[in-house]
Amino acid sequence: MSEPVFTDLRVDRMRRAVDRAIPFLQSSGDRLGESWVRHRWLNGSARDVVDALAAYQQTDGGFAGLEVDISAPVSTAFDGRLAMHVLLGLRVQPDREIAERLGAWYVRNQHEDGDWHFPPAVYEADLAPWFAEWSFPSLNPSCCVAGLTHELGIVTPETLAHVARLWDEKATLDQARSGDFYTMLPIVEYVAHIDVADQESWLDALAEGIGRGVASNSFGDAGHALEHIVGGGPDLIARLDRYDLVKVIDAVLHDQQDDGGWPTPYDPAWRPWFTASTLVLLSNLHDMVV
């Protein structure tokens, strides 16, 4: 019998990584990240996480300030996606209000083409070049939003139907098996939560894409590979090579820096999010594999 993915030694390494990361999150002033990690690893309160997340919710129900590359203080679908990842990373949901307000924002702000476009104010503030050039409609954020809102139970059938038309027009199995992080992202988050036609073929293609990405390091770092592995859920994980799981986990733990945080290829302001998210993803993977 092969050795389990999460050996006692590997779990101990993860716990020590948590102990090192919390001071980094504290020194970064990241109340949300710290409470999220404490909740997942140290029996911290889910209420503390939701209270910290609420600081980013706008009066219209959407979110701003989570997506570092968008500086405008207005709600965007991309900020809401990150908020939903926080909510879905909780072991219990202390209340539904924050999620339901976000769901209502998504319903009100979906365009006729099925996607969520930037409001004009986004272009009037500092904006990362890739977002400045973003074209809508796109599978991202539309399919990410559809999958995550469906999982949270905050979406309407009409909203899903609009996105399904985009999926049928734009999604391909070649994208799923590409081994490119951003090409695969909306497909991972859609297939994990939405029953699509020929689901098994999509899952097989995503497993192939993750295997390709891990083998060639085309995701850029182990943290991005981990995001797709966990984001795809148990049905995708079951299709992955055990060696790839171990390789990614060990590489992620190795990437933790001396100050307790994880690196990022993007703006350094992303480091607290990457640090907290990485540890939550490891906890989620442990729960799904054990």
Image (cartoon, rainbow, N blue to C red):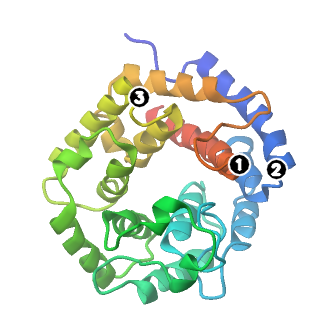
Of discs 3 and 2, which sits in the foreground?
3
Residue 59: tell me if it is visible: yes
Q: Amino acid at mark 3?
A: Asn
Residue 44: tell me if it is visible: no
Residue 150, position as x, y percentages in the image: 38, 69
Q: Which residue is mark 1?
A: 272
Q: Amino acid at mark 2?
A: Ser
Residue 40, position as x, y percentages in the image: 66, 46
Tag 2's secondary structure?
Answer: loop
Circles 1, 2 touching at the beta carbon (< 8 Å):
yes
Q: Quadrant of residue 257?
A: top right
Task: Measure how far apart labels 3 and 2 are at the Cα level.
Answer: 29 Å
Tag 3's secondary structure?
Answer: loop
Which quarter of the rendering shows the N terminus? top left
Which numbered disc, 3 or 2, marks the residue that appears first in the sequence? 2
Q: Which residue is mark 3?
A: 217
| Residue at left offset 70%, top offset 52% | 269
Up/down of 85 relative to 161, above or below: above
Residue 34, position as x, y percentages in the image: 76, 50
